[in-house]
Amino acid sequence: MRLIFIGPPGVGKGTQSQNLVEHLSIPHVATGDMLRDAKKQGTELGKLASLHMDHGQLVPDPIVVQIVGERLDRADCQRGCLLDGFPRTIGQAKALDEYLHQQNKDLDLVLTLDVNQEELFRRLLDRSVKEGRVDDTPDTIRKRMRIYQERTSPLLDYYQEKGILRHVDGMGTPTEVFDRIKAIIDDVAKQKGDSV
Ligand code: AP5
């Protein structure tokens, strides 16, 4: 299965992706994690990415499209993968469509989690105390949310029109949320004739 997780900062994409990749036995392709790894290793890409990430801005499309393309070319992604945090702009979505078209592959499902703004803030501020992520300060969280609304939320219409978008209520415990996701996955797998 080939899936995408879209949603605002703190909605639970990373948390639910961990459960989902285990359930489906597919690789987890998380652009935020890939960029943070590059930053930790001090590569040129990491230095460039951190100029944007640390301030809550998106890393430019050509950079992200290239690293995702290289990742998707690897053997473990040939039978499916979960894209978490990519695409994040219409430009990235079109680049992904083109890549998959060239490979004669399709997207099966786009999941978006719905959580109210107050809860998103609560989760991210809570995480900032536990993990100290540079972009989890109140000002940067607000900026990331604004950028999500402006640049990423238009993707919901983009995938709705393709008929592959499903909304999931992201409120409640991680287990409750995952049960809702599993029900959708099983439904899609049944339509595809796969068993999960
Ligand atoms: P990225 O790492 O993708 O960050 P994000 O989208 O802002 O998402 P978060 O990691 O903050 O939240 P999440 O939805 O994964 O929630 P999580 O499960 O962690 O991207 C970071 C930056 O990288 C971007 O700002 C950008 O600069 C750059 N970047 C990445 N991709 C890019 C792209 N494609 N193009 C350009 N730039 C890109 O949960 C959050 C917290 O809530 C955790 O502490 C968790 O334990 C808790 N939690 C989760 N679920 C629940 C629940 N049900 N109840 C209570 N708490 C919960």
Image: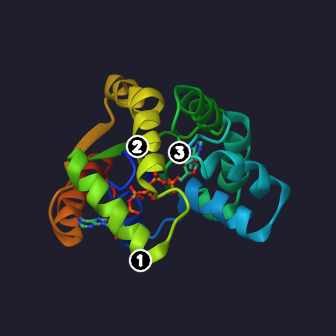
Q: Residue at x 18, y 65 (%)?
A: 179
Q: Residue at x 68, y 55 (%)?
A: 71
Tell me the CA gap for discs 2 and 3: 20 Å
Within the image, what quadrant is residue 122 found in?
bottom left
Q: Disc 3 residue type? A: Phe
Query: Which mark is nearer the camera, 1 or 3?
Result: 1
Q: Which residue is mark 1?
A: 130
- CB of residue at label 1: within 8 Å of ligand 1? yes
Q: Quadrant of the C terminus?
A: bottom left
Tell me the CA gap for discs 1 and 3: 25 Å
- CB of residue at label 3: within 8 Å of ligand 1? yes
Q: Disc 1 residue type? A: Lys
Q: Does residue 159 appear to the left or right of 105 in the view shown?
A: left
Q: Quadrant of the N terminus?
A: bottom left
Q: Position of residue 129 (x, y in %)?
A: 40, 73
Q: Nearer the viewer, residue 69 or 146?
A: 146
Q: Which residue is mark 2?
A: 142
Q: Nearer the viewer, residue 115 or 125?
A: 125
Q: Which mark is residue 86?
A: 3
- CB of residue at label 2: within 8 Å of ligand 1? no
Image-quarter location of ligand 1? bottom left
How many labels were placed on the picture?
Answer: 3
Instruction: Give the residue furthest to the right.
Output: 44
Q: Residue at x 33, y 46 (%)?
A: 111
